[in-house]
Image (cartoon, grey):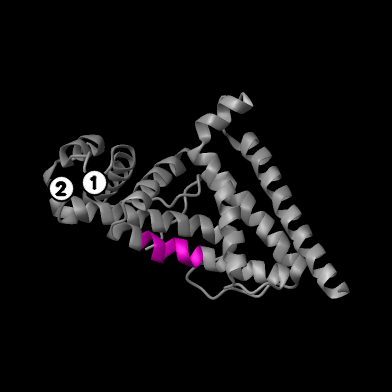
Amino acid sequence: MIKSPSASGLPHEAPKTAADMTRTALVRAALKLFGRQGFDGTSTRQIAAEAKANIGSIAYHFGGKEGLRNAAADYIVDAIQTVAGQAIGNLQAPAAALADAEAARAHLAVALERMVAFIAARPEAGEIVQFVLRELSHPTAALDRIYDGVFEPAHHRLCLIWEQATGEPAESERTKLTVFTLIGQVVYFRIGREAVMRRMGWREIGDDEAGKIAATITDNLSAILARRDLAVRKDRGS
């Protein structure tokens, strides 16, 4: 159920009926308010007001508040699958073999750059990250949908690319932790956004700032890869 991407990289609905428009507005309102206030701290009345919809439309379209939370999770899956598809390939298709290790390393760098461009710079990403952070703190069935739809397949795909780049097994503990580390660098610039802007003297994190962040993170990637290469050479020389 992936929608065509918008200019921001997020999928967007192309509503054909008033019902479609209402459903989309409710999902976006729920995503925003659940992330900001929490599920228990958000009333259906607040969601309806934010969406400019009749409160009864929540039960009509989603069966209730819990169903709306699951719909928000599905929206996140669609959104991140779209962004991931641009960065590392379609998560629902088998991973393609890259030409060689250098091609895999270049692919990793491009993937990180595109992740930064979306997560750090796009305002819409803030709502997604807030929602996900709350789910990670207090897991529900919505987190299961996000993990199965995006987290696990995206992390697995990056691990496979890492294996092609370094020769280290994709499912090794070391590879999985390394990939989490790479992703974590990117995500920090969203969750620590306010601190970063204050310390850097930035008024915003837009495309220019995202480019500087991406350059630093890809430098870190190069340093990790160089350290791995050095370790391999030492092992071969011993």
Q: Is residue 229 above or below residue 200?
A: below
Judged from this view, the residue extending furthest toward the right is: 237
Main secondary structure type of the part rendered in magenta: helix
Q: Position of residue 211 (x, y in %)?
A: 66, 40
Q: Residue at x 40, y 66 (%)?
A: 148
Q: Is residue 19 above or below residue 122?
A: below
Q: Earlier in the sequence, mark 2 or mark 1?
A: 1
| Residue type highlighted by circle 1 | Thr
Q: CA distance from mark 2 to mark 1?
A: 8 Å
Q: Is residue 203 above or below residue 135?
A: above
Mark drawn on residue 57: 2
Q: Position of residue 44 (x, y in %)?
A: 17, 42
**Residue 16 vs residue 158: left or right?**
left
The number of callouts visible is 2
Mark drawn on residue 22: 1
Secondary structure of residue under mark 1: helix
Q: Position of residue 82 (x, y in %)?
A: 48, 57
For the C terminus, the image quarter is bottom right
User: Could you say which quadrant of the image residue 206 lies in?
Assistant: top right
Q: Which residues are magenta?
A: 145-154
Q: Would residue 155 be seen by someone viewing this image from the given angle?
A: yes
For the N terminus, the image quarter is bottom left
Q: Would residue 3 be seen by someone viewing this image from the given angle?
A: no
